[in-house]
Amino acid sequence: MKVLLTGGAGYIGSHTCVELINSGYEPVIADNLSNSSIKVLDRIEKITGKKPIFYEIDVADFDSLDKLFFEQDIDAVIHFAGYKAVGESYMFPVKYYRNNINTTLTLLDVMKKHGVNKIVFSSSATVYGIPKTTPCLDETMPTCCANPYGWTKLFVEQILRDTATAEKEFSVVLLRYFNPIGAHESGLIGDNPNGIPNNLMPYITQVAVKKLPYLRVFGNDYNTKDGTGVRDYIHVVDLARGHLKALEYADKHNGTEVFNLGTGNGCSVLDVVNAFSKANDMEIPYQICDRRPGDIDEYFANPKKANEILNWKAEFDLFDMCRDSWNWQKNNKNGYDD
Ligand code: WQD
């Protein structure tokens, strides 16, 4: 089965590409390298023995994508391509809406033209907004976003749902990721943020590698067990494997289905700091700072639906995630620029 990965050179796309190759799929990557490195392709080859087919194109460009579909006999699509920085999305909302929505609209036009009707979409738990009743989120909970990035995810979910309603042969699987961290066990691919990281784990690994002096813990007065924010961290390899299960599901069903991909465990910022210290035998200096605007006290997944329907379950624990994040960072101090 030939699977197009839009944004396939990125953090989650590259890990999914490895799992697809390992399971006998033929991935084709389309990526404009705006937030990823061409070196990922060699790293994937080192891990799997196979270099994925690669098109350096903008998925919003109809002609380039059309050419790809003419040249490759695509059976299904996993759609990762999109801007993903929450903070930046507040500053440049139009850029976020234009990019994340236009890529999807062009992709759907080209898929229709070539008779491809299976798509797995990289959505986010951010679509649940601020939990009203319980921090344990299942797929039936209401959606409402707190930031433009999140709204782009929710709008794309709706565009895909409407497409599946209009086209009876269409199959859409929406995957709502919780907080992906970790890296492939080889240490050859991993998260490679531009500049100073926004997210917790890459910030910790850059403190560990001494590129940053200490971790700023954003608030210790939240309504949580130790006062710091609680999230559901999931190993990126578990997440990648969830995409294979979603593809299998899309192959057998029509219509739209949505699944949370998380572990079901809520971990505080201090839990992550302590697990990182233990897994890697090093102290992470930190200071308690003010809350980061827009942050939520606590939320984590109810992953029951994915467990039962997709037969998928996260296998790695926080210790594994911390070990593998560090293994990637220590071997690639400057990410793919080393
Ligand atoms: C986790 C916790 C912070 C950095 C975001 C997006 C979400 C998804 C994943 C996808 C919070 C605390 C963080 C730091 C800290 N994006 N923290 N010091 O905000 O849960 O989710 O990333 O592309 O859509 O919203 O993740 O890793 O930024 O924060 O104390 O330097 O760590 O306050 O409690 P978040 P995060």
Image: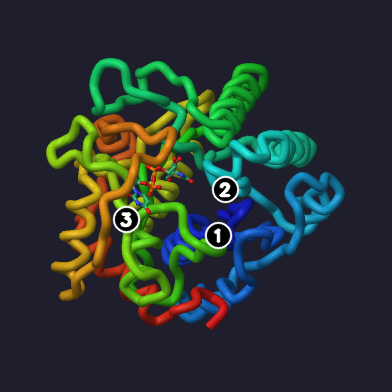
Up-down relation of residue 252 to residue 23 (above or below): above
Q: Is residue 20 visible?
A: no
Q: Residues within 10 Å of mark 2 (few under 14, many from 20)?
A: many
Q: Three-letter amino acid code at disc 1? A: Gly
Colour scheme of this structure image? Answer: rainbow
* Front residue of this view, candidates 286 and 263: 286
Residue plotted at (22% across, 55% down): 272
Q: CA distance from mark 3 to mark 1?
A: 15 Å
Q: Residue at x 17, y 60 (%)?
A: 275
Question: Which structural element holds mark 1?
Answer: loop
x and y, in percent, of residue 17 in the image: 51, 61
Q: Residue at x 36, y 18 (%)?
A: 140
Give how far across and how far down residue 253 sits, in percent.
48, 30
What residue lies at 54% left-to-right and 39% top-to-bottom? 121
The answer to which of marks 3 and 1 sits earlier in the sequence is: 1
Q: How many marks?
A: 3
- Give 26 or 53, whichever is nearer the viewer: 53
* Residue wearing tag 1: 10
Q: Position of residue 47 (x, y in %)?
A: 44, 77
Q: Hey, which quadrant is residue 190 in on the image?
A: bottom left
Q: Which residue is mark 2?
A: 80
